[in-house]
């Protein structure tokens, strides 16, 4: 296992001991939480995800819980999407923006009751932002981190594993739908969601002291289906064109430049942060677009890409590339980039200034697969 100095600044996952026992080899830090990246065989982990079922510790997806008398109006004010028709038991992929329309986070929002919500956040400290906004606006809410640890079960056989553990009725849960469950004394929220294009579930564990028990329960049920440990898969998410906030975005990116246009509502009656700025983006058009790159040759950077690479058209800088992988499904080298709109619309060939030399690429729409 890679050496990692643990301090009180880092949050330890409720599945930590099980992850170590399973042979984790690579870690990252996300939301001040240890995130297992790999268990030593990335190709096997990719195959499990795309052909079978994979088990991921994603407790790094911290929850910002907003509850109280003004919870609904507070959550709407923080969210650039019309939530007026959102029901209890539903999730929504949403954009959270600042007053200038810059994308601060792209969480999944869960509505647990009329007065209680979770933002399941990407890697930025939205707890402080939400508390500051609520205080400024005088909302009657309590905003906390409820210490919930998601466990992802992803892949084409994930539904079989979950049905074997929690019952056949789980197959009827719609995408981004969820149910609150107590199984063998383990309290969790079972949601059909996950950061992959393969389908699956996330188990939002509330009984943090039972993390190893939940991991072992799912791992045992998954044995007939070839389940194995892994982490959010970089290759598969590039093939699927899934956004990695903070990796694929820059600090000034707005949701339209991040491929989130269909999750932003500017014509609704709801008041929310950044609405006027986002309306201007709609009127003028986004300066950049989130696109795919089909790269010539078999070259790939180390996993993951250590830094954003400049994309050029002739001598002009026209964007940055944030990911570069070899796709097993396409047998091609592919990448993700933010590139200026005129260049995207002209479908012009571009050149990537990679650390090991220039690469030529064609711009394509996402997803690749």
Image (cartoon, rainbow, N blue to C red):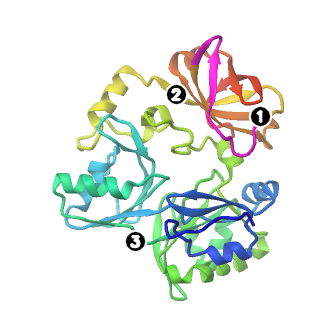
SS state under label 2: strand
Residue 333 circle label: 1
Q: Position of residue 129 (x, y in %)?
A: 32, 52
Question: Does the segment drawn in magenta span residue 309?
Answer: yes
Which residue does the numbered mark 3 point to in the structure image? Answer: 146
Q: CA distance from mark 3 to mark 1?
A: 41 Å
Question: Does the segment drawn in magenta span residue 133?
Answer: no
Which residue does the numbered mark 2 point to in the structure image? Answer: 289
Please tell me which of labels 3 and 1 falls first in the chain: 3
For residue 101, above or below residue 104: above
Quadrant of the image occupied by residue 271? top left
For residue 295, above or below residue 31: above
Q: CA distance from mark 3 to mark 2?
A: 36 Å
| Residue at the spot 77% in from the left edge and 29% down from the top edge | 356
Residue 258 circle label: none
* Residue 27 can be seen in this image: yes
| Residue at the spot 24% in from the left edge and 44% down from the top edge | 270
Quadrant of the image occupied by residue 359? top right
The reply to whether discs 3 and 1 touch (Cβ–Cβ < 8 Å) is: no
Query: Is residue 131 left or right of 300 when viewed as pictured?
Result: left
Give the number of the mark in front: 3 or 2.
3
Q: Which residues are magenta?
A: 301-317
Quadrant of the image occupied by residue 151? bottom right
Q: CA distance from mark 2 to mark 1?
A: 20 Å
Q: Which is more toward the observer, 77 or 133?
A: 133
């Amino acid at each position: 296992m890679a050496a990692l100095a643990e301090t009180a600044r880092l949050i330890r996952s409720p599945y930590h001991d099980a992850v170590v026992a399973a042979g984790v080899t690579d870690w990252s830090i996300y939301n001040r939480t240890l995130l297992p990246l790999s268990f030593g065989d990335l190709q096997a982990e990719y195959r499990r995800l795309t052909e079978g079922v994979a088990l991921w510790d994603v407790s790094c997806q911290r929850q910002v819980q907003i509850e109280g008398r003004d919870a609904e109006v507070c959550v709407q004010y923080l969210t650039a999407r019309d939530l007026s028709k959102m029901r209890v038991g539903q999730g929504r992929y949403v954009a959270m923006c600042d007053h200038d329309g810059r994308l601060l986070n792209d969480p999944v929002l869960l509505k647990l009751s009329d007065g209680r919500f979770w933002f399941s956040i990407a890697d930025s400290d939205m707890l402080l932002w939400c508390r500051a906004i609520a205080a400024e606006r005088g909302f009657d809410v309590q905003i906390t981190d409820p210490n919930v640890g998601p466990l992802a079960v992803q892949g084409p056989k994930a539904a079989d594993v979950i049905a074997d553990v929690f019952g056949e009725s789980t197959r009827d849960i719609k995408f981004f739908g969820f149910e609150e469950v107590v199984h063998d004394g383990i309290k969790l929220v079972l949601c059909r969601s996950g950061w992959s294009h393969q389908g699956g579930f996330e188990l939002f564990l509330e009984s943090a002291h039972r993390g190893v028990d939940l991991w072992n329960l799912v791992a045992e049920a998954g044995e007939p289906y070839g389940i194995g440990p892994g982490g959010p898969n970089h290759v598969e998410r590039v093939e699927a064109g899934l956004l990695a906030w903070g990796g694929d975005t820059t600090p000034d990116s707005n949701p339209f430049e991040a491929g989130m246009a269909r999750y932003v509502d500017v014509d609704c009656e709801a008041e929310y942060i950044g609405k006027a700025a986002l309306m201007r983006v709609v009127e003028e058009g986004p300066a950049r677009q989130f696109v795919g790159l089909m790269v010539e040759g078999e070259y790939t950077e180390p996993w993951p890409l250590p830094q954003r690479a400049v994309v050029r058209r002739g001598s002009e800088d026209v964007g940055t590339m944030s990911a570069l992988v070899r796709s097993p499904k396409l047998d091609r080298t592919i990448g993700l980039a933010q590139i200026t709109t005129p260049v995207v619309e002209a479908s012009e060939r571009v050149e990537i200034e990679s650390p090991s030399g220039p690469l030529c690429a064609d711009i394509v729409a996402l997803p690749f697969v």
